[in-house]
Image (spheres, rainbow, N blue to C red):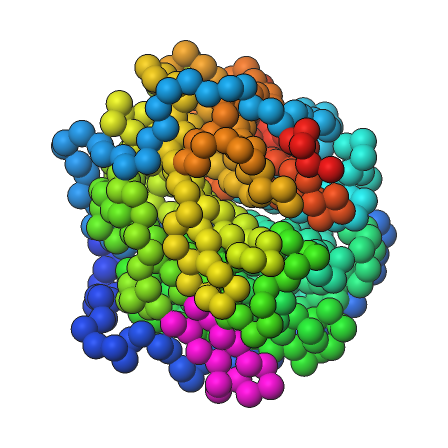
Amino acid sequence: MVQNKCRISAFFLSPLSILSLATLSSFPASAQDLLLTNPQVNLATHFDVSPPVSELARTAPLPQCPRLIHRVLPPKSRNVAAVAAVDGAIQTGPAPLVSAGVGVNVQGVSMTGSVLNCSNQLGFLVAPPDDNLAVGDTQVVQWVNLCFAVFDKATGAVIAGPIAGNQFWAGFGGRCQSENDGDIIVQWDKLAHRWLMSQNVFSSPYLTCVAVSTSPDATGSYFRYSFPQNNGFPDYPKWGVWSDAYYQHNNAFGGPNGFGSEPCAYDRTRMLKGLPNAAQICFFAPTIFDDSMLPADIDSASTPPPTGQPELFLGSIDNTPPTSNVVYAYLFHVDFSHPSRSTFTGFGGTLPISVPIFTLSCRGSGFGNCVPQKANASLLESLGDRLMYRLAYRNFGDHQTWLVSHDVTTASGQVGERWYEFRAPETSSVPTVYQSGTFAGPPGDTNFRWMGSIAMDKMGDIALGYSFSSRLIFPSINYTGQTVGDPLGTMESEATIINGTGSQKDTGSRWGDYTSMALDAADDCTFWYTNEFYTVTAGFAWSTQLASIKFPNCH
């Protein structure tokens, strides 16, 4: 195979190399850092309307070496704990079998096999997959590194794909068309019944390439835009759909002001209309203490957020490694009519939310390379320094709720899934913890659970999907959940979506870097989850699975 003949290429910056770029980074000493004004405002640098995806020309790929997707470690100190981990929300005791069942359960885009093989489109192998999906009226779109495919929601049958990510930009010209750098996101705008597709360009001049479909059909045409990223390498982009904008966060590296945090808002109204002069409004703070934020993403299509409510971001869980009892909140108020009136609140840790104490996964060591796997000494990354995509939002009318998860170290040493339900009344933008828990299996369990994603249906049932592995188990895909009436802070026992039959090697420990639990707005009951696994022990030969999950009490 080609990986045996090539030197694996990767892009990393060490914490020390970036610290020299971030000398201004510290917690603020004054209230002036509480509120940022004077945003950076940019119009799209290029716009067009694409041909239908189903008509995009296929190009023959040129053979290339395998490569790892770019990723940079935020430059925070890593104080690896020698003492036992602590957890203030660990779930103990047995639980009933999860009541949610699996419906559609099919293979997704993969780097191996004869079906849905992305490497056949690329001409090379890549890791990790960055598993991501969204669910529309009749279709599911899965986008992984570096290809996407469209599936029939009812049957799981493939409608289109796999298609290389930059082939989506065929005819657009420029670096959106020539580059295919990964860290992809696909979203379904549940309020407008449109698709949003995005990936960044990770070499200068940096760009965000984003497209909005002209109809609910993912195989149709798109309004395509490119926007500049002027603050450096825009790493680990995450998106959320809100009523007034499409929101994005990037960890920015190597720009004119060093390392920093960059939240952006995109003019959703103009983009849905296909107007070329859509604006991007961004803030930038040169701080190492505000990073890897998630913007809230609407799941309750029938009950959107209160009018005028700013977008909530959560992040920065690793400011005091290896333990913490805080998740940091941020508020983005955008005004596209008067951009100078836009504000961003919370930089510098000024909006902390208290949570039960936790220890970062792998005790806060780097990206968290401590997850074991069967028949292979290579350890996998948990990425425990950040919250895991998405920040799922729902408005019940009498209260608002946000759900999110991340990876932690349990007292017995394995990695488990910490999850939160935050709530706020209709009159408030900043939530508090309503319930939280750490799911690590029954007492005595030594298996690792990591790389989770969480969401809630219209009844209040919660589904949590994640990777599952140990020295005796190949990396697999499991899920659990909580139904209305279960004790707060607990999950039911887990079930399996698919068992892995191989382990990963020779990929720099990369796993993830995220997975995706999405909700089908058509019934507001059916969850869809995607994650990776291996069928054989190998490097760069991952497969993915996508499955629908539903609780019996949701109709």
Q: Is residue 544 above or below residue 16?
A: above
- Quadrant assignment, res 398: bottom right
Residue drawn at point x = 41 percent, y = 12 percent: 472
Residue drawn at point x = 77 percent, y = 32 percent: 156
Residue drawn at point x = 42 percent, y = 18 percent: 94
Say whether residue 257 is left or right of residue 505: left
Q: Is residue 245 in sight in this rendering?
A: no
Q: Is residue 248 above or below residue 507?
A: below
Q: Is residue 518 above or below residue 240?
A: above
- Looking at the image, which residue sits at the far left? 82
Q: Is residue 247 in sight in this rendering?
A: yes
Say whether residue 434 is left or right of residue 53: left
Say whether residue 12 is left or right of residue 5: left
Q: Is residue 74 magenta?
A: no
Q: Position of residue 168 (x, y in %)?
A: 72, 54
Q: Position of residue 295 (x, y in %)?
A: 50, 59
Please identify the quadrant where the C terminus is shown: top right
Q: Position of residue 370 (x, y in %)?
A: 32, 29
Front one among 175 and 279: 279
Q: Is residue 161 above or below residue 311?
A: above
Q: Position of residue 505 (x, y in %)?
A: 44, 25
Span shown in magenta: 331-345
Say whether residue 291 is left or right of residue 269: left
Front one among 144 and 273: 273
- Quadrant assignment, res 35: bottom left
Q: Is residue 337 magenta?
A: yes
Please identify the quadrant where the N terminus is shown: top right
Front one among 371 and 434: 434
Number of numbered labels in the structure image = 0
Residue drawn at point x = 48 percent, y = 80 percent: 342
